[in-house]
Image (spheres, rainbow, N blue to C red):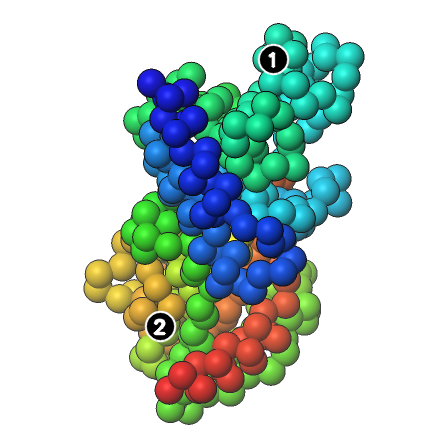
Amino acid sequence: MRRLLHSACVLFVFLILFPAQSAAEMDQKEIYQKRMELYQFIEKVTNIPWNYIAAIDQYERNLRYVRKDLPEPNGLTGIYFPPEKWNGPLNPNQEDTNPASIQFFGGMGRDGDGDNKAEPTNDIDVLFSFANYLLDYGTDLDSIKIGLWDYYKKDKAVFLITNYAKIYGHFQTVDLDERHFPLPLHANYSYRNTWGDARGWGGRRIHEGTDIFAGYGVNVYSTCYGIVEMKGWNKYGGWRIGIRDVNNTYHYFAHLNGFAKDLYLGKIVKPGELIGSVGASGYGPPGTSGKFPPHLHYGMYKYNGRTEWSFDPFPHLKKWERETRKKK
């Protein structure tokens, strides 16, 4: 039945989804639209929820942008199959595109668009192949998670993909690039580039963020569409919140005075949503406050599938400040 539905949809794919136009010729809005159409098409063919297909695709795209050992994506999709996975480890032809011989040698490559070729550079073939792999486990979410763990062998990979899928499912779109400055523009605040400065409390270390000085109780907003991954106390950051967006950025808000009443771990938030308020908490056991002037410490981190590291948020804050002011 799955194959029949697949065949019936092939003509739709070629005539509607993919006119003679490459990803390089599209603007970002068009790219998001085409990706969404692709994910929904794969869902119709395989019954794997489109938001999980989108989440897997985004997870791999994120890794390829920050890893030198992986080729950068150049199509609409981001999933990368090494030749031995696509063609089968014992396949003598590691550039094979014959679906029958690839399957014979245990490769994952499948023909998704009905042209009798399984090509790792074909967006439909790639998404269909991964979805086909997940079908061996089932289409319910628990089965999909098992399939993801067996493929990536990393709890964090499953955790991130699942959270990305929740975000996509909540907003029903993959166009989630909007950002918001973390403080009200009318507030009395100031900041400069402090990323990389030396810090001494708790041992010698560098400052992994930008400090935005403001008064106690000034609202703090989410800068992105994302999911609350961390909430609570840290002896360095005091009361702090961590929000992960789908673009592989962890947004860190520290030294808070308190949290928004409806904020909880796993909550999905949007740009400009209230998450807490400016304070001076930290540098001691829970409840310690006042060891420095009130300010928001804002940090940004990336994950490459192995480790996580900080990068300078100052230019991003300046850009979001301009964009937020323009919207107002």
Residue 272's tag is 2
Which quarter of the figure is the N terminus placed in? top left
Residue 151 vertical position relative to residue 75 in the rendered view, above or below: above
Could you tell me which residue is drawn at 55 percent across and 78 percent down?
A: 319
Residue 84 vertical position relative to residue 276 in the rendered view, above or below: above
Which quarter of the figure is the C terminus placed in? bottom left
Could you tell me which residue is drawn at 71 percent across and 21 percent down?
A: 96
User: Which badge, 1 or 2, comes first in the chain's sequence?
Assistant: 1
Out of 245 and 6, give the one closest to the viewer.
Answer: 6
Which residue is farthest right? 92
Q: Position of residue 115 (x, y in %)?
A: 57, 28
Out of 245 and 201, give the one closest to the viewer.
Answer: 245
At label 1, which amino acid type do we have?
Ala
Determine the image quadrant of residue 47.
top left
Reading the image, the residue beneath label 1 is: 100
Out of 185 and 80, give the one closest to the viewer.
Answer: 80
Determine the image quadrant of residue 136.
top left
Residue 231 vertical position relative to residue 289 in the rendered view, above or below: above
Q: How many marks are shown on the rendered structure?
A: 2
Q: Quick one: SS at disc 1?
A: helix
Q: In the rendered image, is residue 223 in sight?
A: yes
Q: Position of residue 18 (x, y in %)?
A: 52, 47
